[in-house]
Image (cartoon, coloured by chain):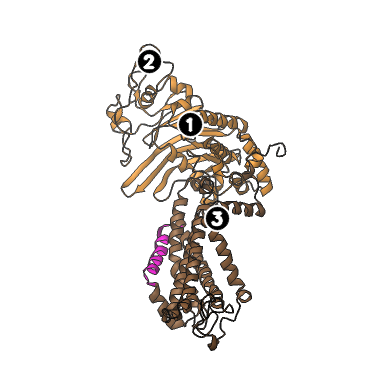
Amino acid sequence: MEPILQVRDMVTRFYSVDGVVHAINGVNFDLYEGETLAVVGESGSGKSVTMMSIVNLIPQPPGKVEGGQAIFSYGEMAQDLLQLSEDEIRHVRGGQIGFIFQDPISSLNPTMTIGSQIAESMTEHLGFSASEARSKTVELLRNVGIPDSERRFNAYPHHFSGGMRQRVMIAIAVACRPKIVIADEPTTALDVTVQAQIVDLVKRLQEQMGVAVVWITHDLGVVAGLADRVLVMYGGTVVESAPVDNLYEDPRHPYTIGLLKAIPRLDATGEAETEELEVIEGVPPDLYQELTLCPFAPRCGYAFDRCWAEVPPLIEVGVQHGAACFYDVERGGPRNGS
Amino acid sequence: MTAATPQVGFDEFEEQTWQKRLAYVGRLLQRDRGGMLGFILFILIVLTAIFAPVIAPHDPLKQNLRAAKQPPAWQEGGSWEQPLGTDTLGRDMLSRIIFGTRVSLTVGFFGVLIAGTLGMVSGLVAGYVGGRVDGAIMGVVNIFLAIPYLVFVVVVAAILGRNLLNVILIFGITDSPIFARVTRGEVLRIRESGYVESAVSAGASTGRILFDHILPNLIGPLITLATFEMSAMIFYEAGLSFLGLSVPPSVPSWGNMLQVGRQYLTIYPWIATWPGVAIAITALTFNLLGDWLRDVLDPRLRRSRK
């Protein structure tokens, strides 16, 4: 199967007053039609910047996408999103790629009705008339689980709770039946019961529409129940990429291993139940430095001379499973050829 | 679907017609006594200005030296023919006050219209485009703020002569920096807001972002500012008239009347009192109205108040 989105060697830098921030240092990944790809990593690892770079949402200046490709292909069409003009990419945003943001409270315009905010992108991208867009919007509101949608078309955002607003945001994201939905920590601002509802809603819509979902999060718990594949990011690079089961059962990058050990488990028994959670010692990498070594080397227990000398590429370690590490954790020594 | 739904507490989601909006404004006024008073006075003042020739009992310019310096009707020597008395040339005070409303409101309204339009457009461009454009526009704005308006007015009055149009233009230009600054500040805030970000990520065009997302969110603060500035301009106009820099002395304006009355303050106090009262009431009206609008124009404050 051909991926609908292929990101290759993407580099994004921010030219701030304090110096150059190397936010994204050569990111590679594929996204397949209809799948859910979870992107995990700590704050500043480049999860959001990667996705923003693809559709030219990086504030410029100071930000700049300085290299790489993002090939978006469906049907016969294939285009590099990074080469499109502002007007062309504008129609990709919302039209082909929908966004769901973290904070539904501030993401809706307080002076516009819920309905017109959803209908807006349909008139913009699909060329719907006002009445067409209206009836589609009512249908969509019902579909995202907002009862009495006919009347709530005219409601204002302050009439809605946080969970309902996030449902509206989801409706906006999928209004034009995009090929890809990028969900940037959509459940972070919500309480746990609402989180589960939102996750279920996105899953259901995904099945209905066959849309690929990129789910940015730092919650590995959510990832397990949701994703098909996982991308682990660290210091502006992808350090591991694997199908979700492989990642949990057989992590190959020392950072991923450390992350998984740091999750409290409900099913822990015996000794493990009382054991303290492990921590990854050290601090995240300084993004003001240009990347010349493995970004995780300073915090890694396995690091050897090569790790300090060059940046490890994503090395294939299994089926669809890549890890950017020179050390073979399984075998207990440097990887062949290292 | 709609018919089957019971009508409980969902009225606010219904489509708004102008009758419903009007009824809604009525309900909002009932909850705020100051706003109610301001609103009623505002309507009365506007009607007075529009229908001045109908309401005024006499010609405001007609002199009658035999009836000069007549006190108000309830004082000794007054007559109900001229309820508020007459001035030194025997002109009817009440009629002059009524016609004076026209000068004050014209200056206030058109002055704010010019200032608001200039300021809003420049502030919108400065805030949204940013960078050098912002620097250039705000530079000009700061220069304008640095000019003492009184000096400016004296110079312009000396060059172009004393008339209402000049006063309005001067007020419009010298007051626009305030609107520009407020607009720019609001635009900067709104531009960084989540809903603009999400509109951009949904592929909205620049025009849509400006007119659907930014403009409606800054119109509230601007209308509020406009009412306050209107009251300030009415004050300033009266001040200029008093100094003899506004309309010619023949035009009945409150400032002119005040100026004449000042000379006779100890002997014929009513000549200066009535224009003073008129100015004070008008200013109060606009301030009450502005306070109320500030509360009402923010959809989030509207519900929570009281």
Check disc 2 and report its element: helix, strand or loop. helix
Residue interval drawn in magenta:
B129-148
Check disc 1 and report its element: helix, strand or loop. loop
In this view, the residue in front, B214 or B53, is B53
Chain bearing tag 2 is A
Q: Residues within 10 Å of mark 1 (few under 14, many from 20)?
A: few
Chain bearing tag 3 is B
The answer to the question of whether label 1 and label 2 lie on touching residues, with beta carbons closer than 8 A, is no
Q: Position of residue A305 (x, y in %)?
A: 27, 28
**What residue would you read off at disc 2?**
A273
Q: What number is the disc on residue B211? A: 3
Three-letter code, disc 1: Asp
**What residue would you read off at disc 1?**
A191
Labels 3 and 1 in the same subunit: no
In magenta stretch: residue B141: yes
Q: Residue furthest right?
A: B3
Chain bearing tag 1 is A
In this view, the residue in front, B293 or A18, is B293
Q: Main secondary structure of the magenta part?
A: helix
Disc 3/disc 1 C-alpha distance (Å): 34 Å
Identify the residue at image location x=57%, y=52%: B30
Q: Residue furthest bottom?
A: B66
In this view, the residue in front, B280 or A338, is B280
Q: Chain coloured orange: which letter? A: A
Q: Position of residue A298 (x, y in %)?
A: 28, 31
Check disc 3 and report its element: helix, strand or loop. helix
